[in-house]
Image: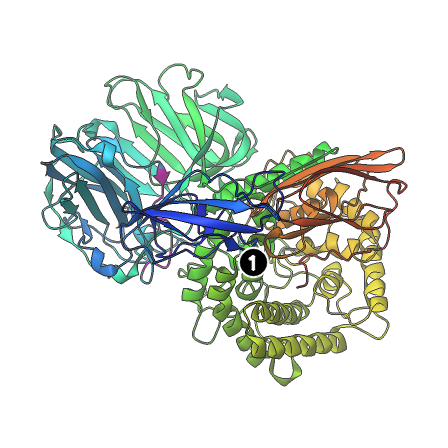
Amino acid sequence: MSFEQLPDGLGIGVPAPRLSWVLPIGAPAQDAYEIETVRAGHVHRTGRTSGADQVLVPWPGQPLTSREQATVRVRTWAPKEEQPSSWSEPSRVEAGLLDAADWVAVPVGGAWAEDPDSDRRPSRVRKDFAVTAPVERARLHVTAHGLYEAEINGRRVGDDILAPGWTVYPQRLRYRTYDVTDHLRPGTNTVGAWLGDGWYRGRFGFDGGTRNIYGDDLSLVAQLEITHTDGSTTVVATDGTWSAAPGPILTSGLYEGETFDARLEDLNWSTPERTGSEPWTAVSIGARDPHTLVAPQGPAVRCTQEIAPVTVTRTADGRHLLDFGQNLVGRLRVTVDGPPGTRITMRHAEVLQGGELATGPLREAHATDVLVLAGDGPRTWEPRFTLHGFRHAEITGWPGELADGAVTARVYHTDMRRTGWFECSDPLVNRLHENVVWSMRGNFVDIPTDCPQRDERLGWTGDIQVFAPTASYLYDCAGMLDSWLTDVGIEQLPDGTVPWYVPVIPGNDIWTPIRPGAAWGDVAALTPWVLYQRFGDLDLLRRHYPTGRAWVDLVERLAGPTRLWDTGFQLGDWLDPIAPPEDPAAGRTDRHLVATAHFARSARYLAWSARELGEDDDARRYAALADEVAAAFRDRYVLPSGRMTSDSPTAYCLAIAFDLLDDPAARARAGDRLAALVLRDDARIATGFVGTPLICDALTETGHLDVAYRLLTQTECPSWLYTVTQGATTVWERWDSLRPDGTLNPGGMTSFNHYALGAVADWLHRTVGGIAPAAPGYRALTFRPRPGGGITWADTRHETPYGTAALSWKLTADGMTARITVPPGCHGTVDLPGRAPFTLGPGEHVVDSAEPRNAPGPVALAATTHPRP
Ligand code: BGC
């Protein structure tokens, strides 16, 4: 069983956590279930409960109290079965500190004077304490103003990094609960933590950034709670009795990198036997309203993979250049020995230019780590409070030979469960899909960022809005995005304006003060619906509904009675390839056409959301509004000839994919025009952030599947596969971040790791692979592969909330044969080319169709981008 959208139940912040379970593959449907909870030795069973619910089922019985533990298990009945299944393995859940009154800890940090406008030396805090009775269990509840890495008796606590992550700290600061029972010993113990500036007070943002965005203190908030076997407890909480000292980290910043002087290191600093000479002094006490302390809703950021360099070359002046063969997000771990004072400098970049690191695209993110050796033998080190986006690294000052295994790149991101895979017969398309996966990994680092390498790394709303469908297939990102959407709601302005990026930080006058922008702001209404469709979490939809409604109400006011949002600043189809490098918003599609289309779409999604939530008045109101905006859109932007006022691919994509045209003939005409425009460009891509996620669906839904495949398999610039042929291992921000002549795009924004243009993967999953949700949470599915582009087989699999859904097909002389897995308790509509659709129940099936190969046909079942309720 799982609890809420969390990987495990330790330190849960929800008193009545919802339960989910998956029936084993091949298991028939579920007719009833029974849940057993054991709390403080008391066994409670619900009895046989009729129903097929198994995803986010309400907690049975009384809510948990703070720190309360329970083990939970479930058994189910199949239809017409008298006997229940065996019980599931027991799952443990333990509440965190559910009440502000549970907290006695206060923020503590170094009390020495610091220049707030400088790179400040990170500190450590520590406290000795006695364990005077046998321990039954011990929990460390901890967070920080800044970033922390805790240790007890010299042993690290947990394996996550960049904790507590980034939220809107004044309103919401996450703490994490760790089981530290095994860290303790009888007698004197020590608890301590490394601290780093992070997002709280580190320099963050572009154009030089801003320091101290949330405060200038660097403080730990920690509460160690020890329960002894006799039931008594000992609490060691951060207070005035703690001490602080500068540590061996001289400087550290998310953009800058980290400098560590091992000569200043006391390996015993977090043990009672500390030996170092550094002056531990009394801490200063900070302020934190415990009502703002919340438990996480998603996984932590962890190392998920290690990669060895593919090549190590030596430059004439003795530097080492390492190519890891994969553009990744993480940092180097080195094992090295050398004389005291040896200074090893590690620089990072995504691409080389002229055989050297191309650091220009990093802008003011120096991404440089420095290790000064102590000469006390081989040392393994990696920075603590920074991350880099890189494929290449340059190391200067390495003593002697750089042996195999001495340098490893460690990949870090939010440790979400992988839930989606795709492969097909075209190796270039497979590489493209891999690049999308890597860009998601690289930019899902506690929040969804635009890019991981330069002096940005912000939670741009538009990027995740277009990428959310793809993300929801590839990884179980519900908890992480639910948390981030909570911050979107917090940062929303009283008038309903949704920021360009969340959390909000000072930006230049384009971004501050915040102005409402289409496609970016529409994350508020569109993304909760997508997550509901993909994960079936109605509570998530309910919690974020007010944010979406306030946004649509704002746009309604801005549009006025015309129902056209045709005034004000807009980004339009950002990074349309025709836009000049220095003006990415200068695309070929009217920005207000883009805005009004999104107005209609958000009103429509809000109507659907309201209906699902039982807000029937709202459902009627927003459905009518969506109809009116769509009508206004047609009157203003669609000419009698069917041509659009912006005769651009993105304009037709919006009209088709957002369902703004009122009759099939108009849709078909728009599809024909779109196909003609694409073929006129010889199927080179002509869309930006807005049109790109929609174009393949728009072509597929209007009978131009072949043109969609022409786009997909194009390798000339601009196109998805052009980047692959240029050696891309992630998705680029620009279609030509690297130009055909091998030079970098001169534009000020040239990232090689942006997931937005990778949103095409959702079409790969649903149309090339063939799996799409047909009901929230994939309770019902559509298996509708549509081959083309010379692709002769494809495999895709998704771990839905109900279990595994899979489809692998290959073309045969007579048509297509397919192996299909339908999750237990679900049913699938199978629509193979040339064969009438039919339904399949749970289990594994082999089916085929007599349809002649590659004959794109009109869309029978209209499996649209997002299933209409
Ligand atoms: C970011 C994008 C973002 C865009 C909006 C860029 O700087 O990298 O991801 O969507 O700005 O203008």
- 10 Å crowding of disc 1: few (<14), some (14-19), many (20+): many
Mark 1 residue's CB less than 8 Å from ligand 1 = no
Measured from the top left, where is residue 403 in percent x and y?
Answer: 42, 15
Up the image or down, 110 lies above or below 485; here it is above
366 within the magenta span:
no
**Could one spot residue 363 in this view of the protein?**
no
**Is residue 520 depicted above or below 692 in this figure?**
below
Instruction: Specify the color scheme.
Output: rainbow
Number of residue marks? 1
Residue at image coords 44%, 65%: 489
**Residue 460 or residue 586, whichever sits in front:** 460
Q: Disc 1 marks which amino acid?
A: Tyr
**Nearer to me, 847 or 173:** 847
Residue stretch rendered in magenta on the structure: 160-169
Image position of 508 with respect to 551: above or below:
above
Ligand 1: quadrant of the figure: bottom right
Locate residue 631, reporting x and y percent.
Answer: 73, 77
Using residue 201 as the reference point, say whether residue 645 is left or right of it. right
At x 10%, y 50%, the residue is 240
Q: What residue is shown with label 1?
A: 532
Circle 1 SS class? helix
Q: Residue farthest to the front?
A: 82
Our reading of the magenta stretch's main secondary structure is loop
Quadrant hosting residue 753: top right
Q: Quadrant of residue 325?
A: top right
Image location of residue 641, percent across then percent down: 86, 72
Q: Nearer the viewer, residue 482 or 803?
A: 803
**Quarter of the rendering occupied by the C terminus:** bottom right
| Residue 309 visible to the viewer | yes
Q: Position of residue 703 (x, y in %)?
A: 84, 55
